Image (cartoon, grey):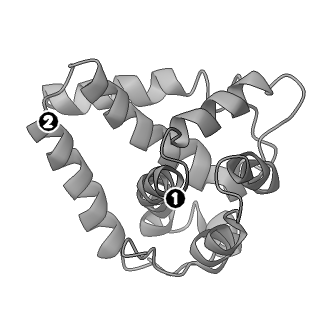
Amino acid sequence: MDKQDYITLLAHEHLHNCTGKKIRNNLERLNYWWSEGLTDYYSRVLALRSSVITLEEFVEEFNKFFENYYLSPVINEPNNLIETDYWQDYAVQRLPYYCGFVLALYLDNFIKENNKSKSLDNVMLDLFKTSKEQEFSSDYFKTIVKNYVPKGIDKEINEYIEQGKTIDLNY
């Protein structure tokens, strides 16, 4: 394991104090796209923001995720099969990490496009602030995002997560 791998692994596991412990996940396997994918996304973003990795290392990490997602042999696995096939197929096991990562980038840009002063950071902060009263669920996530994108993301969650359609970054 090289230095960059160690840093991102440490950041990922540290972030689970928030995504999994503070923000409880009501349906763990069905929400791996969030608990693992968004955690991977933020482990890289926060490492860059804190200057722990360089911009070049950050881009390299992002490119690895894009490659792993878009070339995955199970890219279009629907979420209900991820739940059942998770421990039987390594490619299925990795898909929520890759899909959630790419979806996080998509959502961050989608929120910024619809509300210039806000980002996915605001959604995560809202989830954190309400975590004592509300466990994470896809429906609750969609409700929070609607505060920043009035039309919501029901379609995106249904297509990209539930149905397993390929995430199109050319929205």
Q: Amino acid at mark 1?
A: Pro
Helix, strand or loop for disc 2 = helix
The label shown at residue 55 is 2
What residue lies at 73% left-to-right and 53% top-to-bottom? 146
Toward the right, the furthest residue is 133
Residue 75 versus residue 27 in the image, above or below: below
Q: Quadrant of residue 159?
A: bottom right
- What percent of the width, then of the height, locates residue 61? 22, 46
The label shown at residue 96 is 1
> Counting other residues with Cα less than 10 Å from the Cα at mark 1, is it few (<14), some (14-19), or many (20 or more)?
many
Residue 125 versus residue 50 in the image, above or below: below
Going from the N terminus, do you reach mark 2 or mark 1 first?
2
Helix, strand or loop for disc 1 = helix
- What percent of the width, then of the height, locates residue 138? 75, 55
Indicate the quadrant containing the N terminus: top left, top right, bottom left or bottom right: top left
Q: Nearer the viewer, mark 2 or mark 1?
A: 2
Query: Do the numbered discs 2 and 1 sit on residues whose CB atoms are within 8 Å?
Result: no
The label shown at residue 167 is none
What residue lies at 21% left-to-right and 19% top-to-bottom? 52
Q: Amino acid at mark 2?
A: Leu
